[in-house]
Amino acid sequence: MYRESTPGSHPTLNERTQHLLKALVERYIRDGQPVGSRTLARDAGLDLSPATVRNVMADLEELGYLHSPHTSAGRVPTARGYRFFIDALLNLRPLDDREVETLRRRIDQPVQSSAELARSVSDLLSGITRLAGVVMLPRRNVVTLRHVEFLSLSENRVLVILVLNTQEVQNRIIQTRRPYGAVELQQAAHYLNEQFTGKDIQQVREALLRDLRETRDSLDRLMQTVVEMAEQTFETEPVGEDYVVAGQTHLMQCADLSDLDKLRQLFEAFNHKRDLLHLFDQCLHAEGVQIFIGEESGFEVLEVCSVVTAPYTVEGQVLGVLGVIGPTRMAYGRVIPLVDVTARLLAAALNEQKD
Amino acid sequence: MYRESTPGSHPTLNERTQHLLKALVERYIRDGQPVGSRTLARDAGLDLSPATVRNVMADLEELGYLHSPHTSAGRVPTARGYRFFIDALLNLRPLDDREVETLRRRIDQPVQSSAELARSVSDLLSGITRLAGVVMLPRRNVVTLRHVEFLSLSENRVLVILVLNTQEVQNRIIQTRRPYGAVELQQAAHYLNEQFTGKDIQQVREALLRDLRETRDSLDRLMQTVVEMAEQTFETEPVGEDYVVAGQTHLMQCADLSDLDKLRQLFEAFNHKRDLLHLFDQCLHAEGVQIFIGEESGFEVLEVCSVVTAPYTVEGQVLGVLGVIGPTRMAYGRVIPLVDVTARLLAAALNEQKD
DNA sequence: TTTTAGCACTCTCGGCTTTAGAGTGCTAAG
DNA sequence: CTTAGCACTCTAAAGCCGAGAGTGCTAAAA
């Protein structure tokens, strides 16, 4: 579930080497200092001398799992080192029932919109991890029309209110060719509601436009209104892709990200969204938790960051992705189960909301 | 219009002293280095020797307009110095027609909601000034009910859609005591629309609750529905106070704000909103552009920042405030007219939207 | 063959000193 | 009142030094 298949297989490391690597990564995650042989020898509890440990570390460096900032500074895991650690060595600390319950309560609180829910959940993620929390807004490939309403604003402008799925409300203003009266609009809305409530919005669109547009001239006034409204109402994909980020400021506290310029670029990436959306799209179709370590994400700005994500699904349909973004040196053992459980709880909450 | 009455009057400075102060502030704003007597003497074009300038500078320091970072480092304006500069010395560079036209085009673009408009305008402000742009969302003390719609979601949950003023759409979910059928809800909405469209929402609330609640038992089924819906629908002030910030990342580029920790606190203040809202509230009732320099704002986090704001009004009613936040050392002569004009243009855009 | 002790070596970091340069304040002369 | 001159102050950058941490290598021990 938590595992991700490793890209590029790893040579087999013997038991002891793995144990030392594990101890080193854990130690480094704990206090952020390069780990030296003496420290590691003590830490690992294997009753080895520093000299022996040094030999092992040299091997691990050779293999690309570790890196020395400089000659006399102990070692630090590379992205590859973290990857092996996560795939093969990591002890996950699953949340206990009490924690899950706390989470559930926070997520189950009544909200007005999925956007509000997303914000609240990303706040939650960032608050607990002290990293940046991200929640991609639910998007469904099947969007069901629940209700539509037209309201004349002025001469040629009509306010359209769409209720989609179960409680997603959208409104847009459309320009019409001619002014419409309140009664006309009501009738048109009524017609659409009668005919299409509960139908997939794509189908509605096709049905209306394909069948009716060509015969427009022969239609009665009501149907002409319906068609003009519908044309614009269902014109564009009504649910845009988007996400919310919370707790960016936490990233300013991590010593690992102290480079102001890098940090600025990272924040700008959060705002531009394009790149990150691309990344999250990749996670949509993954099963369970997905982790990108540093360079693995393929984005320059995320060089020193890791991204931990999980998709959330309702009835087998993937609605979106959530996760956290933080420095590569993060407490994976804690973060991974949290992201995993949060995704499940969010799914559950959305499921409940459904009915 | 641009002026703000000075808190704490200033002793009169003679012409030459003022001229030197002006030159110094302008120079400092230009290149951010403390200005020395030699530089200033050359800069001011007064044909004075550095020694003379030094004497003047010593006086200005005495009076609290300037400050020396240390013995041999030239001088820097204090908040008080900036204040006098802005109130009495500043040359405003009004936008030329071409610039205004560009702005107008950006602001007049069609939008779906006032929130979108606010975002777009704060983007605009931050983009031009390369500072953080802020737009407080329109809020009216008179909120007119335009249309209301009820939609049954499930057993005891009803989706309420409110169209307020001209095109502000709000939706909320309310819990009801008993399940309601679609027809009942339609009738209730119909009744409310018939009776109260165009009325102030406060009045609607009072009218419904005061007059009807007590006589509830004697009401027919329709009116009972109406009352239960209305009770919750109009329960809370439906328009919350809020603002949007854009271009925070620009602040990470100003050399003046290079302290990571200060910057973090500033960003957190943006998120918490409480404090800044308080500040903006003060600007709501001011006429024209208002400027807070450093400590003047009364917020620790804004110590090294200035805030330039202007309220925007439609038909004499103040709807909100917009402005920019940046380091104390900003190009006031450019920023102030921009904020001023932007506020007017936004007001104009909202005015147009009205009909 | 593997592990370990010993040792010389390397590199960083903090503190210290030095130096150049910028800018000041004061004084006395114009 | 203005200005030239000068001694003085302070910073910032550069260089130097020593302590400390950690390494790699070698040779001995297990």
Image: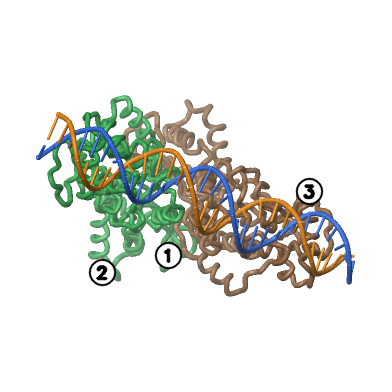
Chain colours: A green, B brown, C blue, D orange
Q: x, y (%) of residue A10? A: 15, 47
Which chain contains the residue that carries disc 1? A
Residue A188: image quadrant is bottom left
Please state which of residues A78 and A265 is positioned toward the viewer in this rendering: A78
Dot 3: element: loop
Please state which of residues A107 and A81 is positioned toward the viewer in this rendering: A81
- Which residue position is annotated with label 2? A215
Nearer-N-terminus badge (1/2): 1
Residue B350: image quadrant is bottom right
**Which residue type does callout 2 highlight?**
Thr
Please state which of residues A248 and B339 is positioned toward the viewer in this rendering: A248
Kindly identify the residue that appears in the image at 47 percent across and 56 percent down. Answer: B116
In the picture, which quadrant includes the C terminus of chain A? top left
Q: Nearer the viewer, mark 3 or mark 2?
A: 3
- Up-down: is C2 above or below A151? above
- Which residue position is annotated with label 1? A175
